[in-house]
Amino acid sequence: MQSQTTPLGEFDLIQRFFKTQSELMLANNPGAVNLGIGDDCALLESGRTEEIAVTSDMLVCGRHFFADANPEWLGWKALAVNLSDLAAMGAKPIGFTLALALPESNPQWLAAFSKGLFAIAHEYGCPLIGGDTTAGPLNICITALGDIPKEKAIRRSGALAGDDIWVSGTVGDARLTLAALRHEITLSNDELEHIQVRMHQPTPRVNLGIALRGVANSALDISDGLLGDLRHILKQSGKDAEIFLDRIPKSATLAKQSQAIQSQYAASGGDDYELCFTASTSKRDVIAKISASLNLPLTKIGSIKPMQYLAPEILIINSAGKTLNTDEAHQLLKSFDHFA
Ligand code: ADP
Ligand code: MG
């Protein structure tokens, strides 16, 4: 039995101290809440033909970024990671609030932060509508709201056996950038210049999310690592998955690294903010058209299977067609947990 003082993982602690009580309250009186904790966004009745999607994400100094991080990039990224959660449900941004703790009121820092923040706010038509400001260790928390026609939100729970599993763009570059900044691997200046934008200024796939309404059966954004995040879809849909490791899309820069680094970073690197979604095989042509119209690669990396045992499993198949054993798979499946 777990002792009272044993530290819990991120998802266990949410479940134990927040989700269970939240679900009890909502079961007794859902009010305007159509979907609570557990997906990329909560969904609320709006009294209109759209539901409102709500999501919060926080960037903490020393955890998500270095203290001397470029403030313009920080402003961009703080909103980008929230818009990515709206995209994962297929929601269109409405606006956002900004809760900010600042160690000092430095006008130069704030001008650059605000520039990055409003650059992305303009790009996605998502105005700032409120917030809170206090002195304290640097911490940036944004809550974003989006609109989604009723019944069209793409939930994590909708994957069906036989669905293709898709990933947008390429994955693993944010992890590659981090490794280069930590001097764990060496990249040329040109290579670093080219890929670091993936870590500092990720592109939320808002238009893809909207285009996938009525096409994808399930979706989420990849914030903690592709295969670990895919597990959330499997868990909530009660399914297994089969993934072909060498089909996971990688940038040319990542493809130059050793096979082990390529697989590790692409499969579980995190901070990618691409979408992983599942869709019926009958949607392949529609998805090819969406890919062409958005000029965004969409890659089929595997398929959804009926669940065999009590917990969802991911069968990972390597380039030689061999299924990875439990230890090999475990290494690749380790996604990011703030308390692990
Ligand atoms: P995401 O990576 O999509 O932002 P997370 O993995 O951070 O999602 O969180 C998983 C789910 O748990 C989400 O539905 C999120 O809203 C919820 N959640 C996370 N932290 C808390 C908390 N402190 N209280 C209530 N819900 C939380
Ligand atoms: Mg998410």
Image: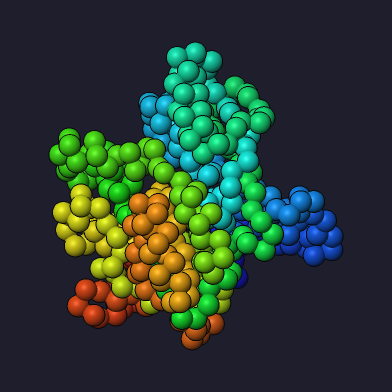
**Residue at image coords 46%, 23%:** 115
**Residue at image coords 20%, 49%:** 253
2 up-or-down from 194: above or below:
below
Left or right of 308 in this view: 271: left
Residue at the extreme top of the image, as rendered? 107
Instruction: Residue 190 in the image: state x and y as whole percent.
Output: 17, 37
For the residue pair 333 and 208, the one nearer the viewer reads as 208
Quadrant into which the N terminus falls: bottom right
For the residue pair 213 and 155, the one nearer the viewer reads as 213
Left or right of 266 in this view: 150: right
Left or right of 104 in this view: 297: left
Quarter residue 22 falls in: bottom right
Quarter residue 302 falls in: bottom left
**Residue at image coords 27%, 57%:** 250
Instruction: Residue 291 in the image: state x and y as whole percent.
Output: 38, 58
Instruction: Residue 231 in the image: state x and y as whole percent.
Output: 48, 68
The colour scheme applied to this rendered structure is rainbow
Instruction: Residue 255 in the image: state x and y as whole percent.
Output: 20, 56
Residue at the extreme bottom of the image, as rendered? 308
